[in-house]
Amino acid sequence: MDATLNTFTELAEVFMLGGTVKSFELISNGNINTTYDVTVTADGVDKRYVFQKLNIFVFKSPKKIMQNIEKITSHISDKLEANGMSRDNVMHFAHTSTGKNYFMDDQGFWRISEFVPNTETFNSCDDLDKLRSAGRAFGEFQTMLSDFDATSLYETIPNFHNTRSRIAVFMRHVNEDPCGRVDEVTEEIEKIKSFKAMAVRLNELIDSQELPLRVTHNDTKINNVLFDKDTGEAKTVIDLDTVMPGLVAHDFGDAVRFAANTAAEDEPDLSKVSLDIDRFRAFAEGFIPEVASSLTPIEIKTMALGALTMTVELAVRFLDDYILGDQYFKTLYRGHNLVRARCQLRLAEDMLEHMGDMNKIIAEVSGVKF
């Protein structure tokens, strides 16, 4: 199914949107799915929707993903309503005549969500107030699901944040060298080996049952938060495909990895890449107070380790994809994934140097003694 006006007209009918599709525009953000901003006109009134075609190469069981999303959005929506709060603070998806929140045929797997008006996203942000607000949004999201049974959720991408497994698979691919690229990245491979002991520590704490699995977002980049254009406050957490059982340290760590980096995720000039400790503090000040009362001390104590772990893990994923011929992440040029991997490894090195500073801030914000 090609992305034409007819495509969106047919989908609008399937999802019972009513009216006529007036226009559509590709949304370029995102490395995985294909997303469109679609305007539908009904009774002279324009209404915007987000039409999204899922990447079923990445998400092998898209129906189960949408079942997860239905469960968690309903849970949060009911809780918001019970507390007299606006249901606009959670995503809403359109349903077909058969009650499904997705549509699939031999041409693709589609879903439609309501477009949240007067909002914006940021691919990078050095505004400390916005980072603090984003931290609160992700913390509130997790708190809303603190009483939700994580075991009832499908694991949308098995071993998604299993860093130990990621490294093991990566090393197997290094040995296989399917595209003849390993000789180009020997230095990066050695750096990953040097980080392994720390990067798998969270796995060891899961194995020993010292860290509990909770419902987590698992993709807590700041561009997965919608901000109100007028107030500047975070309004809604989006991109729920990877919501599944996980660690709080993963959510906190991935957010910090993205938001507190002084450079873009694919910055080729590594001299620009470092951890901004002020941004780190701002996000921690937003996130930790929202979740601290429901966490164990060890969960709080491993948050900084979570940042290092997630940074190393993403470096592994980028470099693994490069070795395999760039199959997973969208790339703009040959070597794009290698540039991304090098950027993450440099950030991980800087995080290691600032581990003491990060832990000190977490202790101050949470009140937990390290």
Image: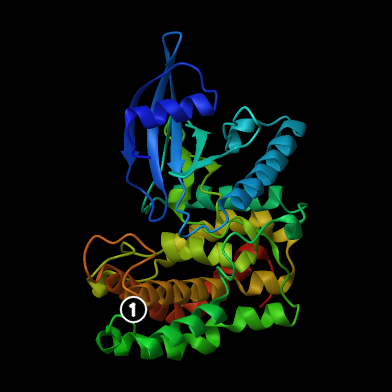
Which residue: 38% across, 56% down? 31
**Total marks placed:** 1
Q: Position of residue 352 (x, y in %)?
A: 45, 81
Circle 1 sits on which residue? 323
* Quarter holding residue 334: bottom left
Query: In the depicted view, which residue is nearer to us: 221 or 130?
Result: 221
Q: Position of residue 167 (x, y in %)?
A: 49, 82
Q: Residue 203, relative to residue 120: is it above or below?
A: below
Query: In the depicted view, which residue is nearer to us: 173 or 311?
Result: 173
Please give left or right for residue 219 compared with residue 20 in the image.
right
Other residues around mark 1 within 10 Å, as few (<14) / some (14–19) / many (≥20): many
Q: Secondary structure at mark 1?
A: helix
* Quarter holding residue 369: bottom right
Q: Position of residue 160 (x, y in %)?
A: 55, 68
Q: Residue 250, relative to residue 352: is it above or below?
A: above
Q: Residue 280, relative to residue 117: is it above or below?
A: below
Q: Position of residue 314 (x, y in %)?
A: 44, 71
> Residue 232, can we see it?
no
> Residue 161, can we see it?
yes
* Quarter holding residue 8: top left
Residue type at mark 1 is Ile
Query: In the depicted view, which residue is nearer to us: 260 or 187?
Result: 187
User: Which quadrant would the C terminus be assigned to in this image?
Assistant: bottom right
Which residue: 53% across, 59% down? 60
Please give left or right for residue 344 compared with residue 114 in the image.
left
Which residue: 38% across, 32% down? 7
Q: How is the image coloured?
A: rainbow
Q: Residue 289, relative to residue 184: is it above or below?
A: above
Please give left or right for residue 296 compared with residue 18 in the image.
right
Query: In the depicted view, which residue is nearer to us: 300 or 143?
Result: 143
